[in-house]
Amino acid sequence: MIFDDYARFQMDLRTTFRTKLLLLTIVPLAVAQVVTLFVVMQTVKQDVEAKGHETLEIGTTVINEFLAARTDQLRTSVSVLAADYGFKEAVATGDAATIRSVLENHGARVRADIAALVDLDGVLIASTLDTSVRSRVDVIQLIADASQRNVESTALVGDSAYHLFAVPLRAPVTIGYVVLGFSIDQALADRVAGLTGLDVSIIHSSDGFNTVIATQSGNPEGIDLSRGHDIVYHALGAEDDLLTIQTPFIRGDSAVAIVLQQSMREAMRPYVEQGRALLAFGLVLLIFVALAGGGFSTTIERPVHALGQAARRMISGDYNRCVLVKSDDEFGELASSFNAMQTAIAEREQRISHNALHDPLTDLPNRSKVLKELTRLIEEARTSGDEIAILSMRIARMSEISSTLGHNAADDLISTTARQLQANLGDIEILGHTGTNEFVFVLPGLDVDGALAYVDRVASLLGAGVTLGRINIILQAEIGVACFPRHGASANDLLRFASIACTEAEASKERTRIYQQGREDEFLRRLRTVNDLPSALRRGDVETWFQPKVSLPDAEVCGAEALVRWRHRELGFLNPDDFIPAAEQSGMIVELTRHVIGDAVRRCREWQDAGYALNVSVNLSARDLLDEYLPYHVMQMLKDAGIPAERLTLEVTESSIMEDLKRSIALLELLRDIGVAISMDDFGTGHSSLSQLRNIPLHELKIDKSFISTICSDEHNDTIVRTTIELAHGMALDVVAEGVEDEATLRHIAGYGCQQAQGYFLSKPLPPQEFLDWLANYEPRPVSDRRGKQRAFAS
């Protein structure tokens, strides 16, 4: 029974495959033949139709030329009658018999069907109409209308149509009109048909109704004369289609039109016979191909069936059994290739499964693998009560190493470092590579103290250096520490917390930082401020405040320092420390600096217009000193504000210059060349040497407030300030003391020759309008006049 079912299944499969193969052979051929025949017949039809169009256009041209010649001939005949002297004399004398005789004779000579004379009022004087016709008011009216219009026209009287010509009779003034009418009849239609070789019809149209005047084997019913000269299809149902064109009998008058028609069925008759013969040949060819395809499908069904079974085994995951096809042809080769593919797929699946959880460069577990293993360890630790330490480590100076030695060398360095770290791992410790220069340690059983001890081991290992070619590179790293369950209970959170601690260690230039609860909120806040800063700049939420600077010893206001403030729409008022570090790390500090400089020079212009010729100073960051386009932006902003360059001072710190001394000095020299003053801010807190200071294009030094605030109580700081002022004067530099908080400090620095001072004793940073109010209320009091502890301003 089972064997019979299997045999029936095989038979069904063979029949289905054979049918499909046969259809695959026959259907494309049948479709190709049908499409070919259709395209050929359509092409023939289009060609016949195009030739029909051309024939109709030529016929229209012939008719127009014939009608033009006929019209000229008839008009000449009328003009000859109107110019006849005897006829004029008879009209002038009122000789009715002579008038009628002339009309009859001349009308008969030119074969006119109507000849008439009307006076200037359109009253019929004489005509060739018999008594029965003359009584027809409509004919008389048509003659009168023709004489009044003095043009040729057409008219329909009963079932007859006439071509009328009216010519004035002058003796020498116009005394009447001669009217000749020629019948438009079947004879004219036959003549036109003989000239064109087409079916011809003459149609009169009035008020949307057509009247067939004459026709010659045509079918003019239903023709729309409003279509003008267009060639249109005139359908006769399934029997035939007619190509139809029309031309007016008189140019500019569509009342009577000549219609030309050509039958598409007659034009296509020779080609239809050839199409039938082609169709018969195609059927014979199709039968032959079907017979050949049936025999061919039988020879290839069996090996294909075997390959199908092998494919189903592979789908189910069975890669062990080979395909057995005993054939030396292409199917045998296909079976061999199928077996090779089966082996390759098995190896590739195993490799893909490994690569999905391992880093391709170091072959260490990637983040997904680390998360999976850490989750497992956390579940075990919940039961055992053990702790787990997670270390997030970033190799420092990788960008410098990559730019110096190349990207390949950097990859080799990471790979070598990974091998050394892995060689020192414990049996249950996990090392993962989660980023370009980022590694993660998972250390079961270690608390915070154990993690710090492990950090020392790693630092010692990296400090021993990694040999790359002939170079031994000593590595440094920042490491963040997070522990389970102290800092978090999920694998994802612990990895994130360790990364946050690592970032904080990098920012603070420390080797190790232990995660502190709530720091993720600070990171989110910092990230939000960086993301919101561009839109805040556009909306004007970022403001520039100003802290006054006075000259010594006269205490006159000489300038102000621009300080940035941000009124965040949700977080409230933000001081610089809340967003400047994040802006520096993200690179947004460049846009922020340009915004502040632009705002500062515009305010400087406002002060000048208000009568205050003050300087303004703006701080630059380390990233700004790498912005090679900064001098051009500064120059343009000064030009737009109409402020001289010497009114702007840009303040830099020693530490920002030392990050890239060569590029920083080059940029400062460009700024100096356009006239901007350069100030060394927070002088005394950095690490520059005097030789380096000599090479920086400076105009002034600002002594840091940490020295100024204790100058009266700390002799050491007093000595530093005095020496710094003397050094600056020796280098022809002005000196600014910041952080002046009381009267004694102001007198002290003035006594040492300090040129300028700023601090809360003078004024705190103020919004622009409040700064203008402060200027209006300020009363300068020279240092020599100060004896008490009065404030430096009157308000």
Image: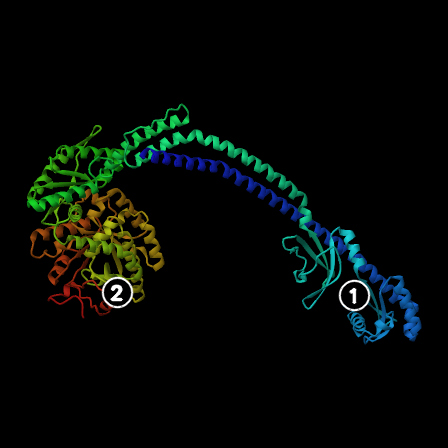
The front one of 594 and 123 is 123
36 left or right, relative to 740: right
Q: Give the position of the N terminus as an image quadrant.
A: top left
Q: Residues within 10 Å of mark 2 (few under 14, many from 20)?
A: some
Q: Is residue 741 visible?
A: yes
Q: Secondary structure at mark 1?
A: strand
> What's the mark number on residue 768?
2
Residue sitting at 20 percent across and 42 percent down? 691
Q: Residue 535 appears at what percent x and percent y?
A: 29, 58
Q: Residue 680 appears at what percent x and percent y?
A: 21, 51
Q: CA distance from mark 1 to mark 2?
A: 100 Å
Q: Quadrant of residue 100?
A: bottom right
Which color mode does the image show?
Answer: rainbow
Residue sitting at 92 percent across and 75 percent down? 93
Q: Amino acid at mark 2?
A: Pro
The front one of 731 and 319 is 319
Q: Amino acid at mark 1?
A: Ser
The residue wearing badge 1 is 160
Q: Residue 652 appears at what percent x and percent y?
A: 23, 51
* 172 is higher (above) or lower (below) than 406: below
Tag count: 2
The front one of 771 and 479 is 479
The front one of 147 and 310 is 310
Q: Residues within 10 Å of mark 1 (few under 14, many from 20)?
A: few
